[in-house]
């Protein structure tokens, strides 16, 4: 099932790479994640889950909990998979200080601290699209993942004139 067919309340986890992934890395990720999803369970029940890779940068898991809240062990299993993939691909997925913004149709990767400099140098502005990797549901993902800087949580770290 494609993530678009999941209910609005499906859980979402977003892991952003610190660099754009090449086609070989993406192919490897897809195989590893698909293998994981086929055995991913919570409370002894298989999870209805899928993943997508967006912009060669973001690994996103979608889980339909179907009325039963996913257990902590199942959540830990996905984090452990991501940690394993970090080591194998020599990338970082769990550093929340790595952020991205859109420059036209291209997605740029930066450190959170760089946003202030980019803003001061007029390379971005309050209308620049940033990625809110803190969204937790599919509905939120669909409407608030790509959002203007002025409407994002990022703005609390910036002075926007």
Image (tube, rainbow, N blue to C red):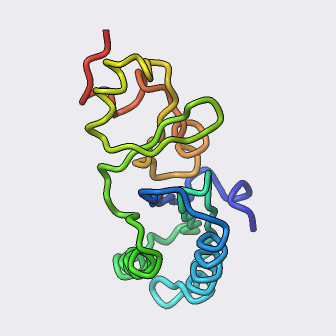
Asked if 37 appears above or below 137 in the picture, the reply is below
- On-image quarter of the N terminus: bottom right
Asked if 97 appears above or below 37 in the picture, the reply is above
Quarter of image, res 31:
bottom right
Could you say which is closer to the camera, residue 62 or residue 96? 96
Could you say which is closer to the camera, residue 161 or residue 47? 161
Could you say where residue 29 lies in the image, as x and y percent from the top left? 58, 75
Quarter of image, res 28:
bottom right
Residue at image location 47% in from the left, 57% down from the top = 19
Could you say which is closer to the camera, residue 68 or residue 159? 159
Could you say where residue 51 lies in the image, as x and y percent from the top left? 61, 67
Quarter of image, res 33:
bottom right
124 sits left or right of 161 in the view: right
- On-image quarter of the C terminus: top left
Could you say which is closer to the camera, residue 84 or residue 65? 84
Asked if 23 appears above or below 127 in the picture, the reply is below
Q: How many marks?
A: 0
Residue at image location 61% in from the left, 86% down from the top = 35
Could you say where residue 89 lies in the image, as x and y percent from the top left? 47, 76
Could you say where residue 39 lies in the image, as x and y percent from the top left? 57, 89
Residue at image location 44% in from the left, 70% down from the top = 69
Residue at image location 56% in from the left, 62% down from the top = 21
Looking at this rendering, what residue extends furthest in the top direction?
A: 161
43 sits left or right of 156 in the view: right
């Amino acid at each position: 099932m494609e993530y678009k067919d999941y209910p609005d309340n499906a859980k979402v986890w977003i892991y952003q790479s610190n660099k754009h992934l090449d086609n070989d890395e993406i192919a490897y990720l897809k195989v590893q994640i698909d293998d994981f999803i086929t055995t991913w369970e919570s409370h002894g029940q298989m999870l209805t889950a899928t993943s997508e890779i967006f912009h060669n940068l973001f690994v996103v898991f979608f889980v339909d909990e179907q009325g039963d809240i996913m257990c902590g062990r199942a959540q830990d299993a996905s984090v452990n998979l991501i940690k394993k993939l970090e080591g194998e691909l020599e990338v970082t997925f769990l550093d929340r200080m790595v952020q991205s913004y859109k420059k036209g149709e291209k997605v740029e990767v930066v450190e959170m601290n760089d946003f202030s400099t980019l803003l001061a140098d007029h390379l971005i502005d309050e209308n620049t699209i940033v990625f809110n990797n803190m969204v937790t549901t599919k509905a939120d993902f669909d409407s608030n993942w790509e959002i203007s800087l002025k409407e994002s949580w990022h703005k609390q770290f910036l002075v926007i004139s």
